[in-house]
Image (tube, rainbow, N blue to C red):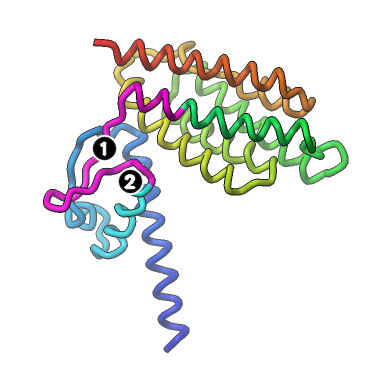
């Protein structure tokens, strides 16, 4: 009996995460738009599952800041402003600065660690894919590779708490920006594409150049979103 219950809990937990991931992709893909409302029942019927894992997934996404819970109306996609985005960028900068300080103090130890070298090469490949998508203006592909890029890059510094927090901020950042970016018919040349330059600077343990790259990225992103948000 205990084994059966454990399997059921794992299955429900997995389903909960699958639903949360699917809904996050719906928001990032612009299919669930800011302010759009829905109920647990509607989502459960859409995915053909019971209400319990759906409710748990929606609560998880609410805790992550992607949804707002309304006691009487269900849930709705959170609406972020350009001011929200500026706050996210500031928070992201604090995290990356902590990583750069760690780089100066300890290095990334890739020179004498084959696994770290392989991980760094994998991050660079992810960055190359993100750059190609940015240059092509393909937002859907860019978001996927960009999230994986930053997730894997932050893991090289060995602090999972910082990495998890940065990932959450980057998801929120994309949720905030897609509502503006999807109004642009052609995004070619308008999206940041300095992923490999940042990896190369970090591989050289050049924290000053890494800071300059991230600062330029933040300025570029803020200027673009504030321009698109202007009445």
Region rendered in magenta? 64-88
Q: Is residue 122 above or below residue 46?
A: above
Q: Residue 138: image x %, image y %?
A: 44, 23
Q: Looking at the image, which residue is at 42% across and 82% down? A: 4
The kind of secondary structure element at disc 1 is: loop
Q: Is residue 131 magenta?
A: no
Q: Residue 128: image x %, image y %?
A: 62, 26
* Marks 2/1: CA–CA distance: 8 Å
Q: Nearer the viewer, residue 108 or 6?
A: 108
Answer few, some or many: residues within 10 Å of disc 2's Cα (few below 14, many 20 plus, some between 14 and 19). Answer: many
Quarter of the figure that contains the N terminus: bottom left
Q: Nearer the viewer, residue 83 or 78?
A: 83
Q: Is residue 71 above or below residue 169?
A: below
Give the residue number, with chain letter if any, for mark 2.
23
Q: Residue 163: image x %, image y %?
A: 58, 43
Pointers 2 and 1 in contact (CB under 8 A)? Answer: yes
Give the residue number, with chain letter if any, for mark 1.
32
The kind of secondary structure element at disc 2 is: helix
Q: Looking at the image, which residue is at 61% across and 33% down? A: 126
């Amino acid at each position: 009996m205990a084994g059966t219950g454990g399997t059921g809990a794992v299955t429900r937990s997995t389903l909960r995460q699958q639903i949360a991931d699917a809904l996050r992709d719906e928001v990032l893909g612009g299919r669930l738009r800011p302010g759009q409302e829905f109920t647990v029942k509607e989502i459960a019927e859409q995915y053909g599952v019971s209400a319990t894992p759906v409710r748990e997934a929606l609560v998880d996404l609410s805790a992550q800041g992607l949804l707002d819970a309304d006691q009487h109306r269900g849930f709705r996609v959170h609406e972020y402003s350009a001011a929200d985005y500026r706050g996210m960028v500031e928070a992201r900068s604090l995290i990356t600065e902590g990583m750069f300080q760690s780089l100066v103090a300890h290095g990334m130890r890739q020179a004498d660690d084959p696994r770290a070298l392989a991980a760094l090469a994998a991050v660079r490949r992810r960055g190359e894919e993100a750059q190609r998508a940015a240059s092509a203006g393909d937002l859907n592909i860019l978001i996927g590779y960009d999230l994986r890029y930053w997730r894997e890059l932050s893991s090289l510094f060995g602090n999972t708490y910082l990495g998890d927090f940065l990932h959450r901020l980057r998801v929120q950042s994309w949720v905030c920006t897609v509502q503006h970016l999807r109004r642009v018919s052609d995004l070619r040349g308008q999206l940041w594409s300095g992923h490999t330059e940042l990896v190369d600077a970090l591989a050289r343990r050049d924290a000053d150049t890494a800071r300059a790259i991230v600062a330029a990225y933040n300025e570029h992103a803020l200027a673009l979103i504030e321009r698109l948000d202007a009445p």
